[in-house]
Amino acid sequence: MPFGVDLPRDIRMRKKRRGPRMNSRVPVTIELNGHGGPLSQEPAITRVVNAYGCLLVSPKEVELQQRLRVTNMATRRAVDGHVVWKGMRRPDGWDVGVEFISADQNFWGVEL
């Protein structure tokens, strides 16, 4: 049986990734704009990065499609994005997939 035939349909039909990913633990700050509430700023850490977004660990629960701003604490660069995936809560926080509004090849300060 070819690889992938036994995978769930949603995984088989998913679009291919747009660029290479890198496992990287980068300290970031996320600014969350609450629904009618004040802006909150939270420290976070990434697990995986690429030019189009990241997988990060958020100390606060977020909603799908919630807009946020990610600031790379090493480079002091910031980029706007939105939540495209929300995983389970772990002891260190929520796993969150973030897609950047516009790709930035230099945002992480490493060659991807």
Image (cartoon, rainbow, N blue to C red):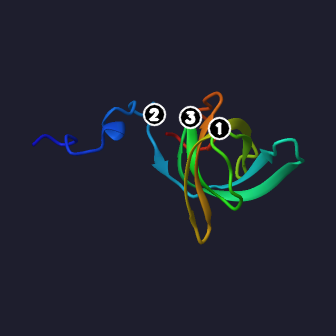
Q: Which residue is mark 3?
A: 52
Q: Earlier in the sequence, mark 1 or mark 2?
A: 2
Mark 1 Cα-neighbour bin, 10 Å: few <14, some 14–19, many ≥20: some
Residue 47, relative to residue 110: is it above or below?
below
Mark 2 Cα-neighbour bin, 10 Å: few <14, some 14–19, many ≥20: few
Are dots 1 and 2 in contact, CB under 8 Å? no
Q: Quadrant of the N terminus?
A: top left
| Depth check, front residue: 73 or 34 | 34
Q: Provide the secondary structure element on which disc 2 rests.
A: loop
Q: Which residue is mark 1?
A: 65
Mark 3 Cα-neighbour bin, 10 Å: few <14, some 14–19, many ≥20: many
Cα separation between marks 1 and 2: 21 Å
| Depth check, front residue: 30 or 95 | 95
Residue under the image location 74 percent in, 41 percent down: 69
* Location of residue 2 in the rendering, given as x and y in whole percent from the top left corner: 13, 40
Cα separation between marks 3 and 2: 8 Å
Kind of residue indicated by mark 2:
Gly
Residue 35 is left or right of residue 48, and the answer is right
